[in-house]
Amino acid sequence: MITLDDISLKDFTLDNLPRLKELRRLSFASKPEICIERARYITRYLRDQDAPGDAPEVRQAKKVNYFLQHKRPVFHDRNLLAGSTTSKALGAPLFPEFFALTLWPELDTVSTRAKNPQKLTADEARELNLEIFPFWMDNNVLELTRKRIGNAESLRLFESLVFFIAAKAGCISHAVPTYAPMLEHGLSGLIGRAAELAQAGDEGGGQADFYRAVQISLQGIMQYAEHLAEEAERRASVADDPEIRQELLDMAKVCRRVPAGPAATFREAVNAIWICQVGIHAENINMAMSPGRLDQLLYPYYKRDVEEGRLDIGGAIELIGCLWLKIADNVTMVPEASEEMFGGAGTVPAITLGGVNADGGDAVNDLTYIMLRVTELLAIRDPNVNARYDYEKNSEEYCRRVSEVIINTKAVPAFFNDRANITALQGQGESIEHARDYAVIGCVELASSGRDYPASSSIMLNLAAPLEMALFQGKRPITGEEQIGPKTPDPATLASFEQFWEVFKTQLDWLVEKAIELNEHMGRVHQQMMPSPLLSAFFEGPMDKGRDLIQGGSLYNSSGATHIAFADVVDSLNAIEQTVFVDKKYSFAELLQMVKNDFAGPAGEKMRLYLQNRTPKYGTENPIARKNARNIVRHLFDLYQSHTNYRGGPYRPAYWTMTNHAGLGGITGALPHGRKSGELFASGITPVSGAAPELTACLNAVAELGGECVPGCWALNIKYSPEGDTGQMSERFAQTIEAYFRAGGQQVQFNIMTYEMLQDAKKHPEKYPELMVRVSGYSAYFKDLNERMKDELITRTMYDLANGRAVPYPGEKGGK
Amino acid sequence: MPNLITQQAQKKLWEQWQKSFSSEVAEEFLQTLLTLMQFAFVVNPEYRQNIKYFEGRYQFCSKDGQVAIAAIFHDGRMEVMEKKINQANIAITFRDGKTLLNFILAPRQDILGSMLRHDVVTEGNLNYLYKFGFMAKQLQLMMPQLSQ
């Protein structure tokens, strides 16, 4: 029930919330610093104290506990919440179990590099070079996988970087824990339960070890909270300002109570969640560890405090603002080489608002609007805020308010369709109540909160690779004469498009099999090396089963596979079908020759223009385009679902790309839809820029792919030109959302900006220091993106909401 | 007197290295780099720390098969030989001298870009390459001092 007089909360501004205003200023002023604290302590522990005879879960728990015991309690500013992910104000933690060693070549230069420098002191660089990195040379996930399978074909494909990315080499993370039991019983209660279960005995599956590991790791968090309290008290004792002294004493008091004990107030609940989130990052790399449905989780504490006079709306806004800024206190360590190709990504901790509750009723509450207001006021990259919307259950006012926040921030939150997404999760065997409690992970992926361990970023597969292999008999121009995939027939010898579709599927299936094969091997390595007893304590399933998440302890298990270059591949198939087999305008041999030559020369350019302008495009109502898009989505769904992963769950296909569509597009040759070599791919499931001139047709073409066949969800990027009348725009905005969702669309995200504005931002970054954009599932600051990504954002089709048509790109005579 | 000889040798190597930056001949650049590295390990105790406990076997080959150079780190020493070795921790096959230079030593190292373009193909443990890249870069940062 909504009790707010004004759901926009317009009376609350940064001017009358000076703490948030200052913290926001500091957030933008902070420069990223590499934090070696975790790397230091886990290395010391493993080198000096590890007991290799312990079960993997216990070894992991002891390692994490050791780090949390030694983790420095720091207070960088006047945020009301205690705890920080790293020892730095804006820290990039190092996880040597994964890719931290990629930093090695630039230890002396990372602080001063031109693009997105990350500060590292000389002493820290020396410690990494001589003490930390040498320990891990043969011991990270990738190298332990190599020890297991040698330089197998699947590993070589991954390491060539142009076929698929096996993300387990860099993380699993990507999960939504549930904090409800912790808030209710405290960590002491969870530890007590684990101790009781451990006493019940071991059924032969290592349950006792698991329960022991849970206790050890949670005790680490409690120890850290104690240290926070001690440090707050110490600082209070030397503080001159009585207001600051009281703030520190209040924080100390909170940390003495939670997360060890149950949360009694809204403030305690918020801080308990944050300290546990920090604890999770001691065990799991900071990539898409998503707090989930905080408006639902925190609402009872908010309501009680308001009713009992302990809290007002302004106080709640301030605490939620403090939480948002805490969540944004860390970034990923990015080596320069990756910065060039894939840079600009945040850590993408997702927060999910609104939607329906377990009974299917409207879940939007006062706190939903408070969190929307905080999102609007702060307009920061992380957390990645997402709004669920059920067009039958949620109010139109809610939809309009979310639209208004998007217009005002120009980018956030993203919209998720409850109807389609709940259907998708039910299709994965989730009960209706559990599916209704879904939250967004990282970019766009879906999971029932705290019940579903989806490893949603396991595989990122480049769909252009099997297309090229289908065109060139199992070879790719970038890998030269090497026979990569199966030797399939020369397309010039094929009699029908259906035959080419079979060839494409042969190459696609082969590549998917290789990606899954490697993911399975890496999963086994994770089971030995990187169990998650701490994270498991915040899930339903592991405590009952006595089994770690990585061993399949969760109620629902799956692995996610996302796909890059979807729209480009659909359009290429369209072009081949229409041009070669329907119109017979060009032979396949002629097409292949021109593609090989990157459409060079006048004849090549003539063909390229024909292919670009006269062939069916995904994002329109053309039946060939709709059929080919549908066929790929269905085929991938069937293919992935036929595999069971090492945790006993299925593979779930998805369509989001982060910045990979720019990086991989940049090194891929010409394609049959008239795309020249090196041009960027379209993002997520978005049609190729300029290919979909009508907004309604575009949204319908995407929407009809939604539901059961895309359980991992998708990222659809739409760019609107801003309008002067925000009220009118949000009205039209909301109507368009509802129509798209009724047609089946699962997700959509927006950039409210013009071609010209983005061009200017590229030219004069100093004029737009805070410009936030949606990339493909997450937000980024435009200035931080690499040049390719900036160009991709600039050239994305922009629609005029008033007439629903694409706005011509500057210099073009009409819309494409 | 020994100092003077060392300084002269360093200066000559430094000049040779500078020249090799503009050379297309991979062997020249690689040989000079490895020789300099060996030299620096001998004369600079701080730099020698890098290989105190380091065991590593590197194989560098050109795509055309003309160049095959190995660098072996063992027992605090570095050995360079013109041949193929067994059980390399990492094998690096490069298109030409320029791509190798970009790969490991350019002011803005382009390891990922080189691999994505398949200018350089690696087989084995990339962590060894990252360490090598650091040592090469450290050497580069040291050289102006050495040449004075």
Image: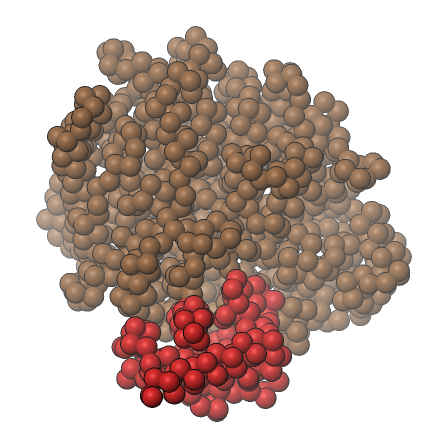
Chain colours: A brown, B red
Quadrant of the drawing holding the N terminus of chain A: top left
At x 34% / y 29%, what residue is drawn?
Answer: A322
Residue A17 in the image: state x and y as whole percent.
38, 19
Residue A301 in the image: state x and y as whole percent.
27, 21
Q: Is residue A141 above or below residue A288?
A: below
The answer to whether residue A816 is seen in the rendering is yes
At x 34% / y 69%, what residue is drawn?
Answer: A137
At x 41% / y 54%, what residue is drawn?
Answer: A111
Residue A465 position by quadrant: bottom right
Q: Nearer the viewer, residue A604 or A449?
A: A604
Residue lying furthest top: A5
At x 27% / y 23%, what residue is drawn?
Answer: A266
Q: Nearer the viewer, residue A236 or B18?
A: B18
The answer to whether residue A652 is seen in the rendering is no
Residue A552 in the image: state x and y as whole percent.
33, 52
Q: Is residue A415 above or below residue A109?
A: above
Residue B45 position by quadrant: bottom left
Relative horizontal placement of residue A816, taking residue B58 as reference (left or right): right
Residue A178 in the image: state x and y as whole percent.
31, 37
Residue lying furthest front: B1
Counting every numbered tag in the picture gives 0
Quadrant of the drawing holding the C terminus of chain A: top right
Residue lying furthest left: A199
